[in-house]
Each structure stands twice: as structure tokens, then as C-alpha cells.
Image: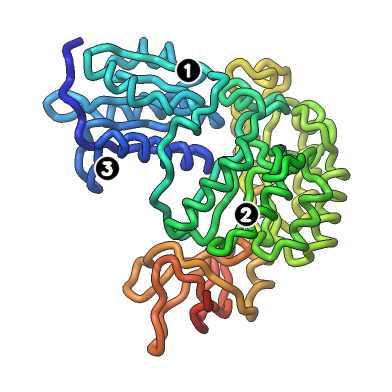
């Protein structure tokens, strides 16, 4: 393959979870440090990075579809790199099926993008899906730009081995980033304008480390240290596992004002038999009792979860147990999916694969129940004041979208006496609720 002129512009397109969004941001920073600039909206880029997710079925087919759409009218293509979990799991096949792809890089190796890019410019096709012992974060550039809300990956990988999940195979074993590195990155994000930081991890509450005095701490200790940063106003974390929800972390929800009253704690199903087949290592009852402990210290907490319908062998009676758990919990929001077999996972070869039409019908019923739950939570919020963090501009002039402390989408308009700006923390009254968002009235900016 002939040599390629050095690219001048790039675009990173990320799919899937918030950790992929974070990885995409870091890859963009890495490319920017090499002198490339982000392509303007709607303009062609010299280099396109497809940062993939492998959790759902047909994820790889979506990659090939996106690669095809990048072909130009003259038959040429930009430099294409496939990154993320699909790259990790199916890198060799991608190289074989898609000649336009010049680079394949896994989620633990993207810090090597610059040297891979140089090889691709020399006409080579390169793959790097190693999981090196050294941390990739030390090789990434320091963060110098941020919006009002920013992501910060603190933990990667998973040791839980749920039978439906590819994450242990694509992200590796659970590892925690060092305390000092996280405090330094959070300080830089706050200096760059971040008022809110969301701590990320495949099992974020499995994070462990040593604080500045050498004391062993868990995620609650990290949160308390971050709360001491004056410029930081809000802290969130996701995604959690019930097994790692310590009493110290529960207590932090009562004791740390900057920790927002929101908890995303996936359960996946309401049937104990299904949970055991999933290797979830908790029961529906133990999950509900855990939520009781959290609510005991933070009664106003908003709860979020993940659900899979149609896991192999799931009966109608077992699905009804999931609906009962939803009713008992009262979720503020939740994510629900049809089971999709992932190659190489134990569940993919289990007996009792559920028919697609049955999964479709169950998912509709589950989502209807979750929507009712979300609407009830939002309606209960109406009439109360809260702080909203303005994250962007609304569709119409003078309208603003924001996020409440409970991670609700809140929309409000400017008032004759004052206007909001992106990045403001404002005081609003919630006046009308739907299942997915609330309308509010602007009261006043929140004093710094």
C-alpha cells in the first residue's frame, strides 16, 4: 500500500457507554497533541476513528456499515482507525473484511495511536490489541479543555464474569488508577471549567488505592478527597456493582454535599434463578435491601438500573418477577435491552434461547413499566426548587437545557431580569414533568 500524506484533520466517532465517550475524548486530545485539528461539522476528515462498543448484538456489522459510508464519491476513503471493544474482540476479522481500515487498536492500547498513525502513513496496516501492564494514562497528554461537566475514568476492567458479558475479555481485569493521578486530572479539569465530574469505571465502586498519606481507601475516600477541591461543585459515579457497594460509600451519600443524589446500580433481572444463571452473585431480595440501606441515609436519592429481558431460559413467570422488582424499586430512570448472545460468552451456548418475538413483547412491557416509574419520580419533583447545571443551548433562542442533581433533563427559558449561560449553575423551580424531562422556571443564578 502506498504512503499517505500526513492527515491534517480528524474525527472521533464514539458509540456505547460513557467510558467510550471518555476514551474518545482522550483519543481526540492525543491526536490534537500531534498537530491535527478536529474537522468542522459536516466536513470530511483526513482521519476517522470509529470508537466501538461490543455489548449489543450486531455491533461489528455496524462498524462495517460505518466504514462503507466513509467511502468518497471518487472511491477513496480517509485514513480509518477502528478502536474500542469491537476492535479488541474482532480485530483480525476487521482487517480481513475491510481493506479500507488501516489501524485497529484496542481500548487498552489507544495511547499508541501516534506511532500507529506513522506506520499507516508509510503504507502499512497495523493492529494493536495488547493489554500492556503499564498504564496507558501516563502516555496521554494532560487535559486542558473541559465543558461544565466532564468524565474521569478511575477504574477499568471487570472480574465479575457475568455469563452474558464480553467486558472481561475486551477490557481485561479490574484495575484502579492511582489516587494522585486522579486528583491531578480532576484539578486540571476543574481549572479548565468543569463544575461537575462523573467518575467512570466498568465497576467504578471497585476502585481502591492509597491516599496522599498512604492510607488504603475505597471509592468513598476518593470522592471525599475530590469534594475538597473548591472549584468542583458536583460529583457523580457510574457504573456500580451491588457487590462493591460498601457501607463507606453508602455513608458518603449522606455526608458529602457535592456527591449528587443519584445511583446507577444495575440489577439485570428480578428472578433469582436467572440472576444465578447470569452469575450476578446477588439475589433480588439482597438488591432491594441494599437499596433500603442507601435510601435510609439519602431518602431523596434517584435510582437507576440496567435490565436484560429474554436471557436464556427466562420464563414468563420469571419475567413477571422483574416487573415486580421494578414496581418495588421506583426507578427514576433505567436502561433495558433484549438479550443478545455475544460470541465467546457462556450464555451464548446455553439452552433455552428465547424467541425474538417474545423478547420484543417483554421489552415493550418492561419499558412501559419503567416509563411509568420515571414519570412518577419526575412528577413528585414538581413544585420544588433545585440547582440546574446548564450544559448547552436549547433548540429555540433563549431556552436552555440543564441537569438537576437527580440527573433529570431540565429545560427552562431566560427571564427578562436575567439570562443563563452554558456552564452556569442556576436556581430553578420545577413546574411540569414528563417521563424523560421536566420544564422549569429560572429563579436566579447560584452564587459561586
Q: Earlier in the sequence, mark 3 or mark 2?
A: 3
Mark 2 lies on residue = 226
Crowd tier of the residue under label 2, counting other residues whose Cα lies within 10 Å: few below 14, some 14–19, many 20 or above: many
* Colour convention of the picture: rainbow
Between 39 and 109, the one nearer to me in the picture: 109
Q: Residue furthest bottom?
A: 417
Mark 1 lies on residue: 129
Image quadrant of residue 10?
top left
On the image, which quarter does residue 141 sit in?
top left
Residue farthest toward the left in the current orientation of the protein? 74
Kindly tell me whether residue 241 is visible in this rendering.
yes
Residue at point 75%, 51% (across, down): 326
| Residue 365 % position (x, y) | 66, 48
The one nearer the camera, 403 or 284, is 403
Q: Look at 11% across and 26% down and name the residue there.
A: 74
Dot 2 lies on which element?
helix
Q: CA distance from mark 3 to mark 2?
A: 31 Å
Provide the secondary structure element on which disc 1 rests: loop
Q: Give the distance between the C-alpha atoms of the residues marked 1 and 2, in whole angstroms.
A: 33 Å
> Nearer the observer, disc 3 or disc 2?
2
Q: Reading the chain from its start, which is encountered first: label 1 or label 3?
A: 3
Mark nearer the viewer, 1 or 2: 2
Question: 20 left or right of 356?
Answer: left
How far apart in space, not on screen, are marks 1 and 3 (Cα)? 25 Å
Residue found 39% across the figure and 16% down from its top: 94
Q: Which residue is mark 3?
A: 38
Quarter occupied by the N terminus: top left
Q: How many marks?
A: 3
Q: Secondary structure at mark 3?
A: strand
Query: Which residue reaches farthest front?
Result: 213
The location of residue 31, given as percent across then percent down, is 32, 35
Amino acid at each position: 500500500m502506498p504512503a499517505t500524506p500526513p492527515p491534517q484533520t480528524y474525527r472521533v466517532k464514539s458509540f456505547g457507554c460513557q467510558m467510550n465517550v471518555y476514551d474518545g475524548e482522550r483519543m481526540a486530545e492525543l491526536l490534537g497533541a500531534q498537530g491535527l485539528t478536529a474537522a468542522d461539522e459536516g466536513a470530511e476528515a483526513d482521519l476517522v476513528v470509529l470508537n466501538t462498543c461490543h455489548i449489543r448484538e450486531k455491533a461489528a456489522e455496524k462498524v462495517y456499515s460505518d466504514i462503507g459510508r466513509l467511502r468518497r464519491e471518487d472511491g477513496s476513503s480517509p485514513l480509518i482507525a477502528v478502536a474500542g471493544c469491537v476492535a479488541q474482540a474482532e480485530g483480525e476479522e476487521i482487517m480481513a473484511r475491510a481493506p479500507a481500515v488501516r489501524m485497529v487498536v484496542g481500548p487498552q492500547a489507544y495511547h499508541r495511536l501516534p506511532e500507529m498513525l506513522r506506520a499507516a502513513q508509510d503504507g502499512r496496516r497495523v493492529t494493536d490489541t495488547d493489554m500492556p501492564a503499564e498504564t496507558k494514562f501516563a502516555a496521554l497528554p494532560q487535559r486542558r479543555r473541559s465543558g461544565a461537566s466532564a468524565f474521569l475514568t478511575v477504574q477499568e476492567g471487570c472480574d465479575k464474569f457475568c455469563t452474558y458479558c464480553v467486558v472481561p475479555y475486551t477490557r481485561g481485569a479490574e484495575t484502579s488508577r492511582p489516587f494522585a493521578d486522579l486528583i491531578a486530572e480532576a484539578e486540571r479539569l476543574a481549572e479548565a471549567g468543569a463544575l461537575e465530574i462523573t467518575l467512570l469505571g466498568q465497576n467504578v465502586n471497585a476502585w481502591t488505592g492509597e491516599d496522599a498519606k498512604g492510607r488504603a481507601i475505597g471509592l468513598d475516600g476518593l470522592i471525599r478527597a475530590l469534594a475538597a477541591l473548591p472549584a468542583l461543585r458536583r460529583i457523580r459515579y457510574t457504573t456500580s456493582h451491588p457487590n462493591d457497594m460498601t457501607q463507606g460509600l453508602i455513608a458518603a451519600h449522606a455526608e458529602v454535599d457535592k456527591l449528587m443524589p443519584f445511583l446507577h446500580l444495575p440489577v439485570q433481572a428480578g428472578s433469582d434463578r436467572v440472576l444465578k444463571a447470569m452469575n450476578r452473585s446477588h439475589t433480588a431480595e439482597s438488591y432491594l435491601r441494599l437499596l433500603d440501606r442507601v435510601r435510609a441515609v439519602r431518602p431523596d436519592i434517584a435510582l437507576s438500573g440496567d435490565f436484560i429481558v429474554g436471557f436464556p431460559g427466562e420464563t414468563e413467570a420469571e419475567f413477571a418477577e422483574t416487573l415486580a422488582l421494578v414496581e418495588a424499586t421506583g426507578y427514576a430512570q433505567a436502561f433495558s435491552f433484549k438479550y443478545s448472545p455475544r460470541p465467546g460468552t457462556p450464555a451464548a451456548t446455553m439452552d433455552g434461547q428465547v424467541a425474538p418475538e417474545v423478547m420484543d413483547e417483554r421489552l415493550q412491557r418492561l419499558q412501559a413499566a419503567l416509563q411509568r416509574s420515571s414519570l412518577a419520580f419526575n412528577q413528585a419533583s414538581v413544585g420544588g426548587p433545585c440547582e440546574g447545571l446548564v450544559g448547552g443551548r436549547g433548540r429555540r433562542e433563549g431556552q436552555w437545557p440543564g441537569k438537576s442533581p437527580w440527573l433529570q433533563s431540565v429545560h427552562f427559558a431566560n427571564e427578562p431580569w436575567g439570562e443563563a449561560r452554558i456552564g452556569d449553575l442556576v436556581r430553578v423551580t420545577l413546574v411540569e414533568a414528563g417521563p424523560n424531562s421536566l420544564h422549569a422556571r429560572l429563579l436566579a443564578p447560584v452564587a459561586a
